[in-house]
Image (tube, coloured by chain):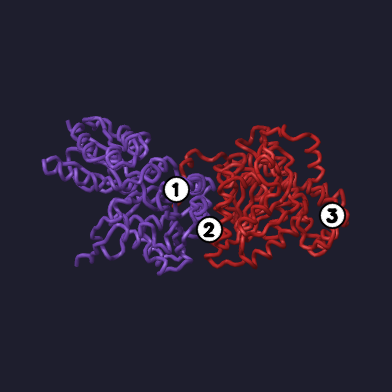
Amino acid sequence: MPPKMQLIEMREALRQAMDEEMTQDESVFILGEEVAEYNGAYKVTKGLLDKYGPKRVLDTPISELAFAGLGVGAAMTGLRPIVEFMSFNFSFVGCDQIISNAAKMFYMSGGRFSVPIVFRGPNGAAAQVSSQHSHCVEALYSNIPGLIIVAPSNPYDAKGLLKSSIRNNNPILFLESELDYGLKEEIPVDEYLVPIGKAHVVHEGNALTLITHSHMVNVCKEIVADFAKQGIGIELIDLRTIKPLDLSTILKSVQKTNRCVIVEEGHWFGGIAAEIGFEINEFCFDFLDAPIARVSQKETPMPYAKNLEAETLPNSRRIKETILKTLE
Amino acid sequence: MTFFSPDPTLSKEQAALKLAKRLGDKALIEALEQMLLIRNFELRGEAAYQQGLVGGFYHSYTGQEAIQTACVAAFGQNHWYTGFYRCHALALLLGATPEELMAELYGKATGNAKGRGGSMHLYADRLLGGFAIVGGHLPIACGAAFSLKYQGKKDQLSLCFMGEGAVAQGAFHESLNLAALWDLPVVFIIENNQWGMGTHVSRSICTETIADRQAESYGMKSYLVNGMDWFESYLAFEHIYREVLETSRPVLVECVCERFRGHSISDPGLYRTKEALEAAKAKDPILSLKSDLIAQKLIDEKQFKELDKKQREVMISAMEFAQKSPAPATTSLEEDVYAP
């Protein structure tokens, strides 16, 4: 019998993940700005206050440093907090708690105190929200040993990965995309998990490996479909987890296609693409038939104007041009 | 400056005598022993540092012993404790052995944190750590209190020590607001030793008294405590313990004290005059407890010397343990970055 399916949005998939884990584990709770009475700025926590009450679903003041750190302290003392940042850009106000406390605690304490906590919320650009609400944080935080960074691109992965993240005993940054909250997909009704640290080959091909994550997967899917129509098979890899990086899936693909383009919504300098490119260079340089190329966000803060925003982000035109050049 | 006393009708001496009678000889001698344990640990640790056996930073608790000794005696160990980088004493008081702590300072595999934390990051079952970003541990203490409340452990509290320098940090204010807003049972304890490294408190905090002014703005109670006196500290902490157990509300405590050493071992303390340092040392909490106990005929000078000698020997043997212990295996370098 085929599994029973449901057509749901990304935000509902995320909500279900939290709901299921809260039902199974009393120590799981949610805190953040507007997560309770307002039902979440993006409605990801909708209905959870009604179901679990104010003990387990808590509205915080606009005080990221305090509530991120409170979460870390609670995680060190037996609870499993889910901290929602209304935007990951607001995590900068509290990032000392993520970097100095959450990430380093297990190691620094000689393995005495683990920090099972999930920080989740929208990351990167939405639509015209300008410089201070659009930054992609994955390159910044992936520089910190001790953190796990997850960035799903679809409802199926979002649900399975969030459940795995809540059960994990380490600090996890779970990066969502505001632009994808409304993305719909059929996913199983029954419980399932998606493992952390495994990339997903979205589309197989032999001509070139296209690597990306989060919202950019959805941009790249259309491009890959266009190339397929022209008979050019592009292998699209959705990283799903940025740290730990699933290097074996990447290397296997590049060894097959011998060409690679990396697309990243965040900036060029010191980006995820820079890291992946270097790893490919280290481990399968001899397999490459063309220089590794990348399409990233240009080195500007995010502008407000629609046309400028579209130009600084990796867009279809720039991605296609880069693929064609790499295929030459 | 008027320090807190639960019974202002009694003189300082009367209150101390009354407390001594109530606690009994054993508890008082234990307090003195603990303070000597801390003092000797710091003496030996600094000596080891000077010999090049200890690296990194070294922040001595010498001079401030009465505060944490009295606090742990009054509250007991069965709470969540959070400390800052001057954390040797708190780890000792919460059950870490001199051997494991000294081995940690020496950077050995047998160390308290496997040689990964060093002087500023020490732990015990109920000590969430020495934290080395000023003020960065206050939200952690709030989290520990949150857990206790969530888990319904009404007989336990969260205790958080900090220096007065932490008061200028945003984390201080956000934590006090959240703790007060959510009725978190946190006892925030400022150890005001008046110097944030080489900057006097008058050049870092905009009000002369700290706890009363800050607590008022967060609707919390505050206490100003003589941190140089074990009896006064104990009486205050005992009172605060009962109160917070009952109210489950955060409180802000300011223990006025002096450190006898520099901010860290590399600080010669040139910002302090010799006279000021001598005046501070005249208030030595160990000598003061000793003379109180001698006055009450609980010990004599000879017995005090024996107690001190005993702790010195404990430390010498801890140093030998540390010296003999192996360095962490380089193969263990990448272990424990992630929890299983």
Structural crowding at the residue carrying mark 2, measured as other residues with C-alpha within 10 Å and reported as few (<14), some (14–19) or many (≥20): many
Question: How many numbered dots are placed on residues in this image?
Answer: 3
Residue extending furthest toward the front? A305
* Chain A, hue in figure: purple
* Chain colored red: B
Residue at 57 percent of width and 63 percent of height:
B183
Q: Which residue is mark 1?
A: A91
CB-based contact (under 8 Å), mark 1 and mark 3: no
Q: Position of residue A42 (x, y in %)?
A: 35, 57
Task: Say the numbered circle drawn on residue A77.
Answer: 2
User: Which residue is disc 3 drawn over?
Assistant: B293
- Any part of residue B313 in sight: no
Q: Eyeballing the image, is B223 above or below A199?
A: below
Residue occupying the point 44% across, 48% down: A90
Q: Nearer the viewer, mark 1 or mark 2?
A: 1
* Front residue (pair B85, A108): B85
Q: CA distance from mark 1 to mark 2?
A: 22 Å
